[in-house]
Image (cartoon, rainbow, N blue to C red):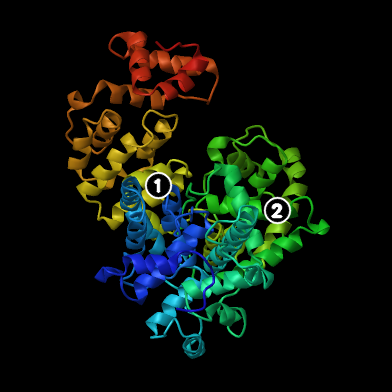
Amino acid sequence: MAETVLTNTGLDRFLELVGGAPEHRGSAFARAAEAVLGLLALRGADRGTGVPEPTPELTRQLLLEDLPAFVYVPPGELALYPAVLGALAARFDGSCVERIAAVVAETAPDFERAMHDPGNLTWHRWYASLLRTCGADLADPEDVRRRLAALDGAPLPDGARRADLMGRTALADVLLTEALTRAYVRDAEEPPPVGPLLTDHAVATGIGRVATALRDRWTAAGLAEQLAGPYAHYAPGPDAFPHLVLADALLDEHLDHHGDPSVPVPPPPAIEAGSVETDADTLLAAVEELAEEEFEPYGGEAPHLLYVVYQRGCSAESVARKAAEYEDWTVDPALEDLPVPVPDGAPGAYAVPPVPELVRLLGTPGLDEADRARLEGPARDLAAVLDRLAATGLVFRTGDAFGLTPRGAGTVRYLLGVRGVAAPDAAEAAAWPATVLVAAAGGWPAPVAARVLADRLHTRVDTAHAWTELLDALGTVHAGTSEAAATRGLFTVLDTTTAPPEALRAALRDPVLGAYALRALEERGEEADPIQVPTSARALHVLDALPAKKGPLESRRAAFDAAAAAWPGGSAALVRAMAEADRHEAERVLGPLGIALP
């Protein structure tokens, strides 16, 4: 064992008490015991009996937070840590044994997952793992140094990014330093009978040095000194990632849109592999330059422009339409997500599209040449911002269309990912379970949702099973919520001409999508039995077909009256069926028409 870092943890006494059992012998068990007892003591476990007493709360924190943050566990030794907890709990009364055993059993899958999750790796845990694979003696600082010197570069584990390891390492440093400081203050204010965890001499040398010694003890001897010195380039710190400033701005944009980083952004259709860190630094330089006064009024909008075009599934956006939004012009919400055609070529100087195209883009009838001229200045200012971004090769502007290049899409995806935003690529999204994909796709632009749902079906060769999975999800995800209508509405973006007829016929009995399936079969000229369609599905199909916001109230009421006239039992029966099937959507659509729900 190396020099003691934490004192009075009861480690020697504990090893003596449990040393009789064969499974409690050996250096691996002693190493696990040193880490478990040390971390429990650091977190304030009662040491009145001479060893730290585990509680359910401390046990859960140890297994799910502290061990995955601070300790490298060699393959085959993971079970030793719960075993130490069990043996430690046995030193106390019987109820302690039962309570700790229950927590260990409950958290076992999450503990194992957390210890193997690349997202939990720190530089020190990763290099300890890598060095052990190379045959290093992790208790020998000289061997650790030699093995580091022999490494050819600094490889990364699968599924991890350098920024991820840097961020996790920085967080672990803060957490360990805080735990040490609190432990010292706690012992100083109420000196424990068994003695302090940290000696005055240890604290006088600096909490940081104590933290370094613990990291070495829990990963590999001498590793922290090497990664802070001659091999610092193997473990870069925050200064090596200036682009994280831009990642923070994109995270803010995502939170403004969705309020939760776990809400997925749609995948781009194509991503070109490149040096994403270098590209991200290049993009940051352009964004910072655009913040200068000469690029007002839209230069500061660069992160927003990058995010919104990515949020569109990287389909092109219109300069004129975006400028109109900035100028508070009325833009038809139904047109906001429609893709913009990208011309094969266009003059370098920007020009607002002709009036007919402007009307199509904005959905605002009655525009004339004076309106077009009024938009010219703002649109040119916005085009200048986009042209500066385009100089990076990560953004393009061709005529009125702008967007991300495939390399730019990969760069923005990287920046979102390093700040924890769920940003799948196309293959990942297509591999998701149907319920997960449908839940996400309901919030995506319809063309993007159509593409990604089609990808999922195509990767499964459009089998009847794949279609049934997807249709079941459309009818059940968000059921009973205000999002149910948007979810089942995804049926309309599917290319049902490729669906096996047996899948659609099986969906006829679905209480949500039955009428949608019937309509799809009829349009294909396929045999279908309308008697199988439940009343709820027929009512939802009618409800979803009613205009909810478009047009004057009189015409919208006329559409309802026409549907009610054809419904068995008339308007009262139709309203009742709609309310029972989807009360949220029925209130939204029928309320403005003055129709009260039962």
Residue 215, horizontal then vertical, whole percent: 53, 71
Instruction: Specify whether 577 is left or right of 306.
Output: left
Secondary element under disc 1, as helix, strand or loop, is: helix
Read off the residue under disc 1.
Answer: 450
> Which of 477/195 is in front?
195
Residue 125, horizontal then vertical, whole percent: 47, 71
The disc label shown at residue 351, or none: 2
Instruction: Specify whether 135 is left or right of 147.
Output: left
Residue occupying image coordinates x 48% and y 44%: 445
Residue occupying image coordinates x 32% and y 65%: 18
Residue occupying image coordinates x 74% and y 51%: 298
Residue occupying image coordinates x 66% and y 34%: 330
Please state which of the two labelled residues, at mark 2 or mark 1, is closer to the viewer: 1
The disc label shown at residue 509, or none: none
The three-letter amino acid code for the residue at tag 1 is Ala
Secondary element under disc 2, as helix, strand or loop, is: loop
| Image quadrant in which the N terminus is located | bottom left
- Residue 220 appears anywhere in the view: yes
The 10 Å Cα crowd at callout 2, few under 14, some 14 to 19, many 20 or more, is some
